[in-house]
Amino acid sequence: MIRLSHFAFDEKQWSSLDEVPFQLPFLQAHRGYWSSGQPQNSIASVQAAFDQNYDMTELDLRLTKDKHVVLFHDLQVLDTDQVFKISDLELRQLRDLLPVTTLVELFEKAPKKLLFNLEIKNETKTQFALEEQLISFFRQHSDWKERILFSSFNPFSLSWMKLLAPEIPRALLVTQEKEYSFFLKEMSFLNLVKPHFINVRWEDLDHYKEIPPNRKSVWTLNDRSMAKTLYHDQKVASVITDEVLPSDFK
């Protein structure tokens, strides 16, 4: 595997951190806080994150066939012996298979002070219906825009968000996992995205060591000792976690 040992950090390829309307919290609850039994990506896990004193929660977004933005991680859902793509199901059909929360319900019911890292789950390079729905939603609810960060593995998705909603911060997800392309691993589309942050798989943190710490978050880190080391050594701006609690830092 080809690996670049160093990145020449160029501020011109990044958006200014002065544009970010909040300070990135050190801890983000991954898909809400669900380690005590709440469903992932749900109102219950979001409320549990708030109750555990997280300031930000990370959630996954997908689009149903009838254009509802839902909180859901996987591309597909299994029904007995059949597999359906979320994008092929209407909301009512999806809810016949399992409970799911919509973006509208999230912002109607979630704690008002909580920040959100909304990961856009779009595997295509040319279709941006999910992104367009998000833009439409936040244009109607402009007061909520100051509480969100968009993130994605898809640089084309984030470039679309940069074009239509440049005022909302963006984070490019990066990893060295084998199934991902060389271009993503080495951030070849950085200038297209102009992110404010990158979200790095924590095992690959050293690979991206040339990126300034205030630009980096790591996922998904559940080792409390390692999280505390990153905090005290100021190696990253934020940790996305299932298990590390804000109370661990008191």
Image (tube, rainbow, N blue to C red):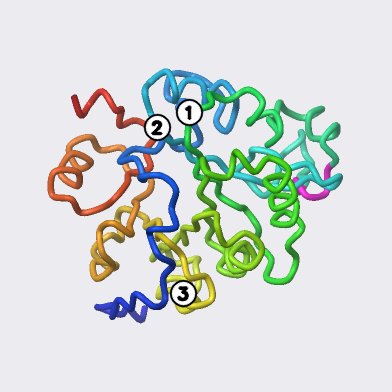
The residue carrying mark 3 is: 190
Q: Quadrant of the C terminus?
A: top left
User: Which percent across, then down, holds residue 36?
Assistant: 43, 19
Residue 127 versus residue 193: which sits nearer the camera?
Answer: 193
3D distance between C-alphas at marks 3 and 2:
28 Å
Is 11 left or right of 116, judged from the image as shown? left
Image height check: is 41 above or below 37?
below
Q: Amino acid at mark 3?
A: Leu
User: Which percent across, then down, holds residue 30?
Assistant: 45, 37
Classify 10 Å Cα crowding around label 3: few (below 14), some (14-19), many (20 and above): some
Image height check: is 128 above or below 227?
below
Mark 2 or mark 1: whose residue is earlier in sequence: 2
Whether label 1 touches label 3, CB < 8 Å: no
User: Which percent across, then down, holds residue 56?
Assistant: 43, 36
The residue carrying mark 2 is: 55
Q: Amino acid at mark 2?
A: Asp
Classify 10 Å Cα crowding around label 1: few (below 14), some (14-19), many (20 and above): few
For mark 1, give the secondary structure.
loop
Magenta part of the protein: which range? 85-89
For mark 3, give the secondary structure.
helix
Is 125 left or right of 8, judged from the image as shown? right
User: Which percent across, then down, holds residue 158?
Assistant: 58, 63
Q: Identify the residue at horizontal 40%, vertical 59% (top origin).
A: 197
Observer-side mark, 3 or 2, equals: 2
**Circle number at residue 113:** 1
Whether label 2 touches label 1, CB < 8 Å: yes
Task: Say if the magenta span includes residue 88.
Answer: yes
Whether label 3 touches label 2, CB < 8 Å: no
